[in-house]
Image (spheres, helix red, strand yellow):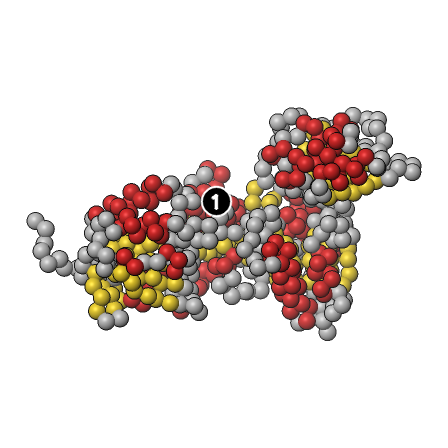
Amino acid sequence: MSGKLWGIGLGPGDPELVTVKAARIIGAAEVIAFHSARHGRSISRAIAAPYMRAGQLEEHLVYPVTTETTDHPGGYQGAIDEFYEQAAERLAAHLAAGRSVALLAAGDPLFYSSYMHMHRRLADRFEAEIVPGVTSVSAASAALGTPLVEGEQVLTVLPGTLPAAELAERLRGTEAAAVLKLGRTYPAVRQALADAGRLGDAFYVERASTGRQRVLRAADVDEGSVPYFAIAVVPGPKPETPVPLTAEGVRAEPPRPASNGVGDTRSGPAARARTTTGGALTADGAGPLGAPARSSAEHSAMGEVVVVGLGPGDPNWTTPEVTAALAEATDLVGYTTYIDRVPARPGQHRHASDNRVESERAAMALDLARRGARVAVVSSGDPGVFAMAAAVLEEAADPRWAGVPVRVLPGVTAAHAVASRAGAPLGHDYATISLSDRLKPWEVVAERLAAVAAADMAIAVYNPASSQRAWQVAAMRDLLLEHRAPDTPVILGRDVGGPAESVRIVPLADLDPTEVDMRTLLIIGASTTAVHGPRVFTSRRYATLPR
């Protein structure tokens, strides 16, 4: 029989506002599915974490775009539609196999939620049931401590993405209003409130019900600091009791990475929910609200963080030591592309995220280990070469992680894999340089390239180009030609060890930047590098030894 799809409303953020039914279904479901942006932090996953149990499969559905641009041929909408189709099929595979799937939704599943897109695509094929949740509008009203509407008053709910003129017109024609989807839309929303003559009566509620809740007058909000999870409220009746405004400039302490989920752990409500869940046990070992209980020993002993390298792509290049560490890990943390290379194992939690949040990933891994988890931080190639080992060790130096064990397990580097395909171009002294200027200025990169070129060393070049960064390859070529002969061999190794592997050898003067992307590694030869048939090697002997 097919499994059942559950649309689970989690409420506005406080795990204690999760309904009894939602908590029960979360604990019983075989698969937990949740969305996040490319940074990998899922608010829904963090809210549900106290009610989840060990051994559940997780489907992390990562939006390809949120507010940024895309080169998808169908534009933004085309990219989103394709994502929803692919996400629906991932869930359909579980449902067809007979597994129950709980798809998490902050607030209510049918109130400005992504759940509805999955429901449309799956409810005609599989049994589906929706568990409603407390909406952000209700949470914002509670935060204000004042009614939104009374008697015959009309409440209008508006998306902040409407054109400012239309938003102002709708605000003029209603007694009460709630404006959602703020973030970057807030300047236009505030202007619309002012144009409608409602700004003086409007309030701003940020992250309602959580430990980071803020309540301000809408006119006093810093436009540059508004998150997506904020709401502007114009109550119908005039507040008869003081609105609990947050002191100007005061913010709650930012949350730490979640202990057993992708996202943020909150002190206060989340901690209370976790304590309650693991406290009073029933006869069958379940905690209150049907949430599976975590034993007190589960988080009492210190775990560890092991930073591992998978090698460049071929599974045969992953060492037995790393394979064993992956098998022993309770949690995997890493860039989505690398996490996907690790075979799924029942009961193992996978925390995938965007490639640009290294310090956040490191903090999450250390926090998980501090709470007892055995964490494997996954890198491609070798973790100590332009990868996660340095980020984890740098974060681990913070006193708050004192006592958390960290180990680093080596892997085959991309440079050595490409070199082996070509022969032995790194057979003598060589340098390894990243062309990326995201963490260091290009001037530093250029100085290092010039110094290595002048020293007559072969160079392994990582991160040569990306879709947003293409000019550096040409700049590097021109700089190296000031020190190297035009016929110096250059090896272009792309996706070595992967299904699209290609290895080419070209003269330095003919290096075409358009043939280089982020999946390419370059090896630039030295004066003693020679091409012999299909093989390249750098001799360890000089014709004339320097005195």
Residue 210 visible in rendering: no
Instruction: Say if 291 sits above or below 253 in the image.
Output: below
* Secondary element type, mark 1: helix
Seen at 34% across and 66% down, the residue is: 503
Looking at the image, which residue sits at the far left? 547
> What percent of the width, then of the height, locates residue 329?
50, 58
Q: Residue drawn at (69%, 43%), measured in percent from left and top? A: 161
Q: Does residue 121 appear to the left or right of 381 in the view shown? A: right
Q: What is the quadrant of residue 396 in the picture?
A: top left
Residue in the foreground of this view, choosing between 364 and 497: 497
In the displayed structure, would residue 414 be above or below residue 16? below
The quarter of the picture where the N terminus appears is bottom right
Q: Name, please, the residue furthest toward the right.
A: 151
> Residue 255 location, x and y as percent?
59, 40
Q: Position of residue 464 (x, y in %)?
A: 38, 53
Q: Which residue is mark 1?
A: 359
Sort mark 1 into few (<14), some (14-19) or many (20+) by Cα contacts within 10 Å.
some
State the residue in front, 235 or 146: 235
- Depth check, front residue: 268 or 213: 213
Q: Residue at x 82, y 28 (%)?
A: 239
**In the drawing, does residue 480 fall left or right of residue 145?**
left
Q: Quadrant of residue 267?
A: top right
Question: 447 left or right of 93?
Answer: left
Callout 1, which amino acid? Ser
On the question of residue 363 being in view, the answer is yes
Image point (65%, 63%), residue name: 85
